[in-house]
Amino acid sequence: MEAVFLKGRKCVRNDLILWFRQGPGMPAGPRLGLSLSRKVGGAVRRNRLKRLLREAFRFNRHLIDAGADCIFYPRPGCRWKGLGDAEHALLELCKKAGLLHRAPEAGA
């Protein structure tokens, strides 16, 4: 995880930050890392955000480049209501970072 912070790049939204690193020699399949501050909320809130991000990543893993290491950091003030909000934020940042190897289908 430290290598992603040191040698990786960063993309930002108002509710989520993505640090990522990709390239040859990386393990097969995209990998997910999560980092949450106590500023986001109490333990219940932080655990809910982690669950939402894990699930959104799992549903869209096939769209993300195989050699990518991704660390997501929800920012304080993140107001997601459910999985749809988390999935939208995750896909938007991955697209902005150039990690999507094909566009998500409409209605998905």
Image: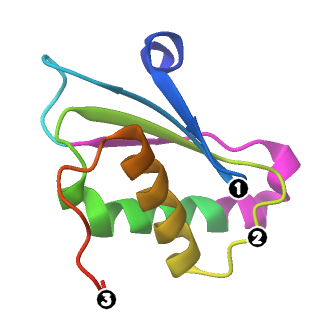
Separation of residues labelled 1 and 3 (CA atoms): 23 Å
Provide the residue span drawn in magenta.
30-47
Rendered position, 105 above or below 3: below
Are the two marked residues, 2 and 1, in contact with CB atoms closer than 8 angstroms? yes
Q: Count the numbered circles shown.
A: 3
Instruction: Give left or right: position of 100 versus 12.
Output: left
Q: Residue at x 30, y 83 (%)?
A: 108
Q: Earlier in the sequence, mark 1 or mark 3?
A: 1
Q: Quadrant of residue 25?
A: top left
In the image, residue 34 lies in the stretch drawn in magenta: yes
Q: List x then y, in percent, for residue 30.
A: 25, 42
Q: Which residue is mark 3?
A: 107
Q: Callout 2: helix, strand or loop?
A: loop
Q: Which residue is mark 2?
A: 79
Badge number at residue 49: none
Kind of residue sitting beneath label 2 = Arg
Q: List x then y, in percent, for residue 8.
A: 44, 19
Badge number at residue 15: 1
